[in-house]
Amino acid sequence: STTRRPLMAGNWKMNLNHLEANLLVQKLAASLTEKQLTDVETVVLPPYTDLRTVQTAVDGDKLLIGYGAQDLSPHASGAYTGDISGAMLAKLGCTYVVVGHSERRAYHHEDDALVGAKVQAALTHGLTPILCVGEGLDVREQGTHVAHCSDQLDGALKGLSADQVKQVVVAYEPVWAIGTGKTATPEDAQEVCGEVRRRLAENFGQDTADVVRILYGGSVKSSNVAAIMAKPDVDGALVGGASLDAEEFAKICRFP
Ligand code: PEP
């Protein structure tokens, strides 16, 4: 992973109001040096209602922190009450958007076709989709987790060109390790991240597979991040709970 810039993305989920969001972003930026923020791409993924505040903080102080949303509509605009378009996110300076998080797949019944449409919508608006794949405990226990993740990947990237896939970030998040304190072993993370890269090479060419960043997510903390990042096909982390603490997330970003 020598040529791929490490990416640490903090998924705040449904936490923090706009005042708390401002505080966290300021603290995070103050905890990291310019060199650290250059070496490791640092991104926060707040709820929609915090995005304008994060934009103001980042622009106002020229912070080297990227930001994005946790979901987007597959549609460009129109009669979709409660939804948010890629154009709206891009206008707020977002550069990333999470797509297909396991919580959205589970609680909002998102399938691979919808997730794929959201990937396309993100790319259309110049946003980098962070496409999440991952198996539940039942699938893990059956031993079919690699095929499961491969199928989710294929389903969501169907119809994309190699050049489009080069713009995508993939996150492997085993559902049984999210918010449970149960981290997959570095070997578990590598097994699926390696397969994701192999599959990308098969479908879109080795040059595409070589540039796509693949993250691991699931109870990542400052105490376990280095061992996970040492694996060859893990290029970063998608961090939930631990990203709500500025000092802890800064420590994760300082993993090397
Ligand atoms: C997530 O939901 O993306 C996640 C990885 O959560 P946590 O770090 O809290 O397990």
Image (cartoon, rainbow, N blue to C red):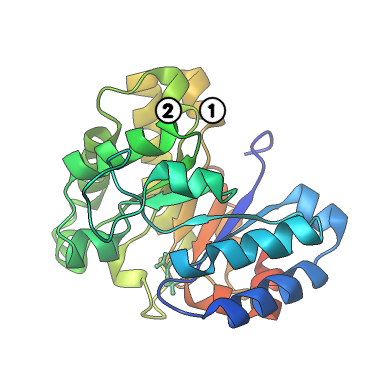
Residue 47 is at least partly visible in this image:
no
Q: Nearer the viewer, residue 39 or 47?
A: 47
Numbered disc 1: secondary structure: helix
Label 1 lies in ligand 1 vicinity (Cβ under 8 Å): no
Q: Residue at x 26, y 46 (%)?
A: 149
Question: Tag 1: Cα neighbours inside 10 Å, few (<14), some, or many (≥20)?
Answer: some
Numbered disc 2: secondary structure: helix
Label 2 lies in ligand 1 vicinity (Cβ under 8 Å): no
Which residue type does callout 1 highlight?
Asp
Residue 28 located left or right of residue 15:
right
- Name the residue that disc number 1 marks: 210
Q: Quadrant of ligand 1?
A: bottom left
Instruction: Tell me if residue 155 comes above or below residue 57 in the rendering.
Output: above
Q: Residue at x 21, y 36 (%)?
A: 155
Q: Nearer the viewer, mark 2 or mark 1?
A: 2
- Name the residue that disc number 2 marks: 165
Which residue type does callout 2 highlight?
Val
Residue 104 located left or right of residue 255:
left
Cα–Cα gap, marks 2 and 1 = 11 Å
Residue 144 is at least partly visible in this image:
yes
Give yes or no for contact between labels 2 and 1 (Cβ–Cβ under 8 Å).
no
Q: Nearer the viewer, residue 132 or 121?
A: 121
Instruction: Tell me if residue 54 comes above or below residue 16 in the rendering.
Output: above
Q: Quadrant of residue 60?
A: bottom right
Question: Tag 2: Cα neighbours inside 10 Å, few (<14), some, or many (≥20)?
Answer: many
- Image location of residue 53, percent across then percent down: 61, 67
- Image location of residue 76, percent across then percent down: 32, 38
Q: First in sequence: mark 2 or mark 1?
A: 2
Residue 195 located left or right of residue 102:
right
Q: Residue at x 38, y 28 (%)?
A: 200
Instruction: Tell me if residue 171 comes above or below residue 33 in the rendering.
Output: above
Check the picture and name the quadrant holding the N terminus: top right
